[in-house]
Image (spheres, grey):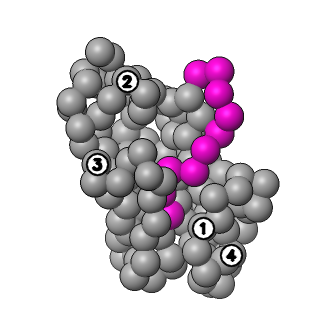
Amino acid sequence: QVQLVESGGGLVQAGGSLRLACTVSKTTSRPYAMGWFRQPPGKEREFVAGVTYNGAVTDYTDSVKGRFTISTDNAQNTMYLQMNSLKPEDTAVYYCVADHSAIMSHDETKVGDWGKGTLVTVSS
């Protein structure tokens, strides 16, 4: 099991940037994939980005490709989501996730560990 704590959310104007961080406290040495989901106001939770345990492979939902970048710093047990060119439709609670799988599933019901979330608000 891993424990996940997000930081870096806040209010930003459209076109601006934010960087989310997720600190991982793990109690297992098994490799795990990590990623980010988000839940916009009044909508379902959705996959945003994922990365394999070694950082070699990344995966993004179409709406953020070219704007968001997921990365890991294994020495610091931290994962990041750099978000550029933010749009009002990116407004959501962003959740850090981890799972003992090769790559992060897009299906939230198959994800094992969740952080509590951090709110990102993009004003127009």
The answer to whether 9 appears left or right of 86 in the picture is: right
Q: Which residues are magenta?
A: 41-50
Quadrant of the rendered image containing residue 117: top right
Q: Earlier in the sequence, mark 2 or mark 4?
A: 2
Residue occupying the point 65% across, 39% down: 45
- Tell me the mark number nearer the camera, choosing from 3 and 1: 3
The residue where tag 1 is placed is: 104
Q: Secondary structure at mark 2?
A: helix
**Residue 120 locus on image (x, y percent):** 42, 30
Mark in the foreground, 2 or 1: 2
- Can you say whether 77 is above or below 95 in the image? below
Compared with 29, 6 (above or below) is above
Q: Is residue 21 above or below residue 7?
A: below
Residue 46 in the image: state x and y as whole percent: 61, 44
| Mark closer to the observer (1, 4) | 1
Q: Which residue is mark 2?
A: 88
| Helix, strand or loop under label 4 | loop
Residue in the image at 66% along x and 52% along y? 114
Q: Residues within 10 Å of mark 4 (few under 14, many from 20)?
A: some
On the image, which quarter does residue 100 sit in?
bottom right
- Mark 3, Cα crowd under 10 Å, few <14 / some 14-19 / many 20+, is few
Q: Is residue 43 left or right of residue 54?
A: right
In the depicted view, which residue is nearer to us: 43 or 16? Answer: 43
Whole-percent x and y of residue 53? 51, 78
The residue lying at 59 percent from left, 34 percent from top is 39
- Tell me the kind of residue under disc 2: Pro
Q: Which residue is mark 4?
A: 100
